[in-house]
Image (cartoon, rainbow, N blue to C red):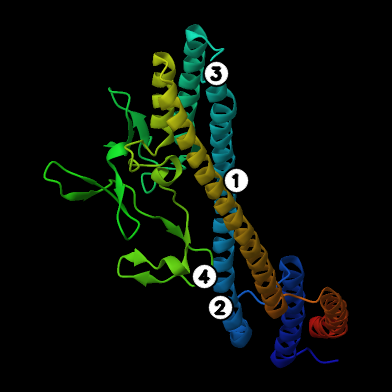
């Protein structure tokens, strides 16, 4: 028997390496679960996978935004509900008792002290934080507490006295300086987040119809300015005035302030209802985006994922091929080598 020539050896090694390569590739596909790992292996499917991954990233980011906003709204709703409970307590319990003829001066002073404590609680709630963000700080979300009481005990918002603040025809808030010129309230701009509505920009501003407003101006919550009768429209100052009227025993003033509390309570219920509607809307968006992300993941898996049964069958065939090649080598190379040695 003649010695295997170079062509025979080369062909054998080619078959052997091919069999080992096929086993390695199939093993890699089974381990990774991917039919290919480089776009060059399947340009058509790879291009579609890249596009789907980009869409998936956007959908997952929007879904994360929606879930974050929903959690924040839950905290906002709970805070407003607590404030509304305080207003209800002031109206139905404290003022009724304070205006009763059977309540003496010492009793009204005790109620005034309770009102003072509730007033401080309202101020604390107005500066509630979600994470590092002030819920009612407008675009002053993480700089400093938006609400504070000045040395005169008057409520300020981002440094501006709340009773001096007015609302313009476009909905923005302003105050007047010493020259009676309109000045915007510092750090009270709207802040928006992309939740999958087709975000668009108008210059440097966000198109409010294509994004979700996530900021709340504390002025919309606690109130601002004064009414036609000169009464304050913000909760803190009204509670301040109630405390003062109780200490002085001014029953007429207490009656006026009680009516003001009722008006503010109605506004609070409106704010809570609005947040409930937003939460329901976000629930719908969350469901839609969850379905979108699932669809993109399924598409990617369909484009590049492996069929376990098919790969197992392929690997079995690869094993047979490798064994056959090795058997062929055992029949060719050793015999040829012995002939050569002889």
Which of disc 2 and disc 1 is earlier in sequence? 2
Q: CA distance from mark 1 to mark 3?
A: 38 Å
The residue beneath circle 3 is: 100
Which of disc 2 and disc 4 is earlier in sequence? 2
The residue beneath circle 4 is: 197
Q: Secondary structure at mark 1?
A: helix
Name the residue located 84 percent from the left edge and 82 percent from the top edge: 321
* Quarter of the rendering occupied by the N terminus: bottom right
Looking at this rendering, what residue extends furthest in the top direction?
106
- Relative to the observer, which residue lies in front, 244 or 322? 244
Instruction: Please say if the residues under marks 2 and 3 sit with CB atoms less than 8 Å apart.
Output: no
Q: Is residue 158 left or right of residue 308?
A: left
Q: What is the x, y in percent for residue 35?
A: 70, 77
Q: What is the x, y in percent for residue 80?
A: 54, 40
The residue beneath circle 1 is: 74
Q: Nearer the viewer, mark 4 or mark 3?
A: 3
């Amino acid at each position: 028997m003649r010695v295997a020539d170079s062509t025979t050896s080369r062909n054998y090694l080619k078959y052997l390496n091919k069999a080992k390569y096929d086993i390695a590739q199939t093993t890699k596909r089974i381990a990774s679960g991917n039919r290919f790992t480089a776009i060059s292996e399947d340009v058509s499917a790879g291009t579609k996978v890249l596009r789907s991954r980009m869409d998936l990233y956007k959908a997952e980011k929007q879904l994360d935004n929606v879930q974050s906003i929903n959690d924040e709204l839950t905290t906002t709703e709970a805070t407003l509900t607590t404030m509304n409970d305080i207003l209800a307590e002031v109206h139905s319990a404290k003022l009724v008792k304070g205006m009763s003829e059977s309540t003496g001066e010492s009793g009204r002073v005790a109620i005034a002290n309770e009102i003072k404590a509730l007033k401080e609680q309202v101020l604390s709630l107005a500066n509630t934080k979600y994470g590092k963000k002030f819920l009612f700080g407008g675009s002053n979300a993480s700089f400093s507490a938006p609400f504070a009481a000045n040395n005169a005990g008057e409520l300020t918002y981002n440094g501006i006295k709340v009773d001096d603040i007015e609302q313009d025809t476009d909905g923005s808030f302003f105050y007047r300086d010493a020259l009676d010129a309109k000045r915007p309230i510092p750090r009270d701009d709207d802040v928006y987040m992309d939740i999958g509505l087709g975000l668009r920009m108008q210059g440097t501003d966000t198109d409010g119809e294509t994004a979700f407003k996530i900021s709340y101006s504390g002025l919309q919550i606690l109130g601002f300015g004064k009414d036609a009768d000169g009464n304050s429209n913000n909760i803190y100052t009204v509670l301040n005035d109630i405390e003062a009227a109780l200490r002085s025993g001014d029953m007429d003033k207490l009656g006026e302030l009680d009516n003001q509390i009722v008006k503010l309570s109605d506004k609070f219920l409106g704010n809570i209802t609005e947040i409930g509607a937003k939460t329901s809307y976000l629930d719908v968006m969350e469901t839609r985006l969850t379905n979108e992300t699932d669809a993109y993941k399924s598409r990617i898996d369909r484009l590049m994922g492996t069929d376990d049964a098919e790969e197992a069958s392929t690997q079995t065939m690869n094993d047979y091929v490798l064994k056959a090649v090795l058997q062929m080598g055992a029949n060719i190379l050793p015999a040829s080598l012995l002939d050569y040695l002889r």
